[in-house]
Amino acid sequence: MTDGGRTGAGPGTVGAAVAAGGMSVELPLWRAISLFRVLALCYAVLRFFDSYLQFLHPVAGWIYLGALTLWTLASTRAFSNPHRCTWYVLATDLVLAVTGIVMSGMVDDPSRISRGAPTLPTIWAAGTVLGFAGRGGWRWAAAAGSVIGVANILGHGGPTGDNVHNIVLLMVAGCAIGYVIELARASEATLTRALQVEAATRERERLSRDIHDGVLQVLALVQRRGGESASGGPPGAPSGGAAGGPGDADLAELGRLAGEQERALRALMSGGPLPAQRGADTPEDPDRPQDLRTLLAPYADERVTVSAPGTPVPLPAPAAGELAAAVGAAVDNVRRHAGPGARAWILVEDEPEAVTVTVRDDGPGFAPDRLGEAERAGRLGVSQSIRGRLRDLGGTAELYSAPGEGVEVELRVPRATAVGPR
């Protein structure tokens, strides 16, 4: 249960875990206890009003019930919330309950007591036991019930059948409520920990995707430099590359990217924040729409064709960035696995309810069980960089392929949930 930012879990403490959807199991029980005390007070006053003329000292009874009324009304707010219902409040409540029980044996007629007449607080004393149950669990409820039971036996009629019956009912109710509240706290604390683990896992997956994309960028540059070195350098460049030429620039870029990925990997392993990745910047205002076409245009080259509507395709900036990164991961897979002569086509469809991006290639394709084998082998490009991103956006990523028929990746983001990674 949430209140004051505190979290508790376990017997003897005040719980503060929040169940799924923000609903607490414990807080309604406390409100029920608070309402019970008020209703029990009304019952005690009506019972006394019906028989006060039969008391030996009715004025003393009225004085006690007046004090009990003032205390009940003053402590109603405290009993409706576990953090306000302190041990001092409960101790005062217990003293008033015991005082009323003992006074009953002094102000009532002995013949009425022997016939099983109720005490002055009657069932109001059960509210005290329930308060101890809510605060400390069934053990504290049993302790408070025992104190009230001893006061009832010593101060109001002795160990009669009615007294023993009422004490047993009080103990059973108090211990049952205390046990239920302990279970509620433990369940809510377990759910809170599970939600925290899920949130942490999602964040780690997001960081892993970013690092995965960055590592691929470094490897692509290494591959390009290796190919240029094997062929004697880029077309038109002097052998070995002149100082300050394109070769040196590429090596400097390679060193910078490698440094970025080293810091990112260290942050991922240590649990620290991920360093900013180049090209991952989005507008400062996350609600500002961004045209998806501008993010996908850089993927077009002699092997990749981008087809998009003639009008802007707006999405919230975080969602647009994640969708574009997923498309980039799909295009990178084409370049790495479809072969040097394979072509790819990116089709953007702007629909009223969703934005769909399809990436299709004419490569060799793969067998249906290939993705599962790759994931088991630790290659998480599709599961994290593509499917993971779309899952966090509330969308879907579907892959279709068969040997010799290329690969088609369909990425669909509903506009209602396109708010960025969660």
Image (cartoon, rainbow, N blue to C red):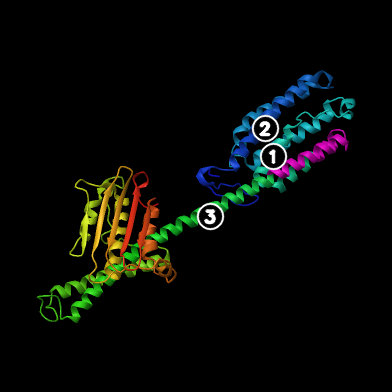
Give residue 347's quadrant in the image. bottom left
Query: At which x and y percent is residue 118?
Result: 81, 29
Three-letter code, disc 2:
Phe
* Element on which disc 2 rests: helix
What is the secondary structure assignment of the residue under circle 3?
A: helix
Residue 273 in view, yes or no: no
Q: Are marks 1 and 3 in contact (CB under 8 Å)?
A: no
Task: Give the labeled residue for mark 2.
Answer: 36
Q: Residue furthest top?
A: 53
Q: CA distance from mark 1 to mark 3?
A: 28 Å
Q: Position of residue 315 (x, y in %)?
A: 29, 47
- Mark seen at residue 158: none
| Residue at 78 percent of width and 19 percent of height | 50
For disc 3, the marked residue is 193
Q: Does residue 165 show up magenta in the picture?
A: yes
Residue named by callout 1: 130
Vertical arrangement, residue 258 with respect to residue 129, above or below: below
Label 2 Cα neighbours within 10 Å, binned few <14 / some 14-19 / many ≥20: some
Residue at screen point 82% across, 18% down:
53
Q: Secondary structure at mark 1?
A: helix
Q: Earlier in the sequence, mark 3 or mark 2?
A: 2
State the residue at coordinates (90%, 26%): 111
- Say if residue 85 shows up in the picture: yes
Badge 2 vs badge 1, beta-carbon distance below 8 Å: yes
Q: Is residue 183 left or right of residue 208?
A: right
Mark 1 vs 3, N-terminal side: 1
Within-10-Å neighbours for mark 3: few <14, some 14–19, many 20+: few
Inter-mark Cα distance, 3 to 2:
33 Å
Q: Nearer the viewer, residue 245 or 53?
A: 245
Q: Which residues are magenta?
A: 149-177
